[in-house]
Every structure is written in C-alpha cells, then in structure tokens.
Amino acid sequence: MNIVHNADDIQIEISSREAVTPKVSKLSSPARVVVELPATVMATPQNKIAVGSAGVKGVRIGMDGKTPPTTSVVVDLEQACAYELTPGPGNSFVLTLHTQAMAKAPAAEMKLQTASAKPAPAAPAVIKGNPARATAVAKPHDAFVPKKAATSAPVATAKLEAPKAAVPVATKVAADDKAAVATKIGEAPKAPKPEEKKWAMNGKRDPFFSPVVQQPTGSGCSTGKKCLEIGQINLRGVVHSESGFIAVVTNTLNKAYFLHENDPVFNGYVVRITGDSVVFQETVQDKLGKPFTREVVKRIITPAV
C-alpha cells in the first residue's frame, strides 16, 4: 500500500498478488470510505497508517476472520468527500479522495449567494407630456422630485406613470422565511424531517479490525535449553544411563544439547524419553489468541546406545 499527497487530493494505491474485484462504499458517523477485497489476506503486519492531513485522519487494514477471509481497507475522514476508484498498473487500483473540493464548496456557495442578493436594475419610468424630454430616463431616487429649471423660462409639467409591464425580479427566499411565505399564500408549512437514528457500537468488536492474532516467530535467543523451539529441534540420538534415557538434540545452528525428562524448553517441556523417541508438551495459540497444548513426538531410526 502506498499513499501519495497531491495538491487537490490524496491517492491510496492498493496492490495485490492476483486479480481482485474490490467493492467500495461510503459510511457515516463517523465519515469513512471502505474498500473490501474478497478472498484476500493481509500481506503486511502494519494494520494502521496515520495520515493527519487534507481531511484524512488515517488508514486501517483488517480481516473479518471468515473462510475465505475478506480484507478491508478503511480510510477515516474528518468529513465526507468525493472519491473514485480506478484501476492501476498490474493487479493494483488507486482510491482517489478529492478532499480539497469539499473545502472549496462552502466558499463557492457563499459567493453565489452574495451575487444573487444584489437587487435587479429598476425598470425605467416612462415620461409623457413633453416631446423634448420624451427620451429622458428618471432615476429611482428622483422619479417624484422635479428638478428646478436652469432659467426662468416656463417648463411643461411632465406626467409620470409606472410602466405597464412590471419587470420580474428573482428573489431568493431564506430558509427561515419559507414557512411565513407559505402561510401568506395559503399553503400549509411542511413538517420538519425527523432526525436520523444513530447506532452505537459500544461493547462490540470493530468489524474492520482483524481478530486474528499475529503469532510470534522464534524464541529470540540462541543459547541454552530454554531457547530451543520444539518445531526446530532435531533429535540426533538417545543414550541410556543409570538415571534413565538422555536425548541428544540440536537446534537450527547445529548446536547439541542433552535433554532429560521434565526439562523446560522455549514453548513447552519434555514429557518422556523412550529408546527411539522424545515426547514434548507444546503450548501454542490459535488464530484468535486462545492458548492450548498438544503433544509433539520426535523419533530417530538409530536405536538407543
């Protein structure tokens, strides 16, 4: 998985070893985008990637534990945004999150409301009675205030009347005034929409977090009997002594050790030793992290000495 930060978006590239048909969905409360990969398993031990920029909190990866399992890639968002899923090179595809488009949308909407709030130009008033001034246009503020004559010559009185056809002006009614306008024209106000129900997931497992526990690999040390891992022990021989049988074993580095009954090792202990075998009691964990024990038998072809 690769995350690329661009100027207007964030791209998340998801790769797979074989062809996969992904399913993408958009969820809310909280806002997130989920990409489901059916019949796949995680190929990386890292299940959380922090982003913390451009409205993206981070990315989570997990499996649902079914057979076959489904791997889910969850992108946690600060708010909902537009997205698209496009195929990439080979068996990969790219999830593009247009995070900057949501940041620019409120500014564009405010600009549109400001432009629509400007009043439309007033219709010109028609002047009758004076042919010499028939082409003059009266301004809204001086339509009813006659100007004084520049000379003492008499001026014919102009009769002003409103235009016959009124020019329609588009008026944007605010959301709070819709109920008042509906009451004036005799229309009953619409009932408010009920709030959406929100479901709480308290006490339940996150379905996008894998319940499979990562098993530890190796004992982490290489010296001493307690560093011997039962799966990597090689039985080289069994020696008969006065106190009983003694098993000669080696580790992956071909270093020899002598084991007696009840001797502890890294993931268990020796139960019993016979002339041609050693029985171990091994403690392991299942995929969900629940511990259980089992017997492991190591045998040799050469009989005891």
Image: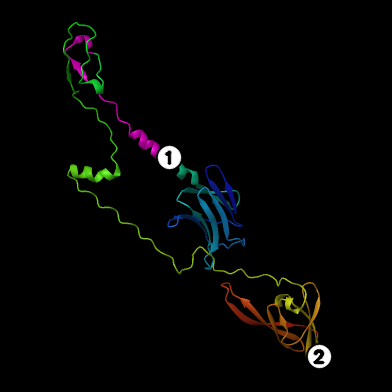
| Residue 86 painted magenta | no
Residue contact at pointers 1 and 2, CB within 8 angstroms: no
Q: In this view, does 290 lie above or below 200?
A: below
**149 sits left or right of 297 in the view:** left
Q: Is residue 105 above or below residue 247?
A: above
| Residue 111 painted magenta | yes
Residue occupied by mark 2: 240
- Which segment is the magenta one? 108-134
Residue occupied by mark 1: 107
Three-letter residue code for mark 1: Ala
N-term-proximal mark, 1 vs 2: 1
- Residue lying furthest right: 305
**54 sits left or right of 256 in the view:** left
Q: Position of residue 96 (x, y in %)?
A: 52, 48
Q: Residue at the location (79% across, 72% down)?
A: 253
Three-letter residue code for mark 2: His
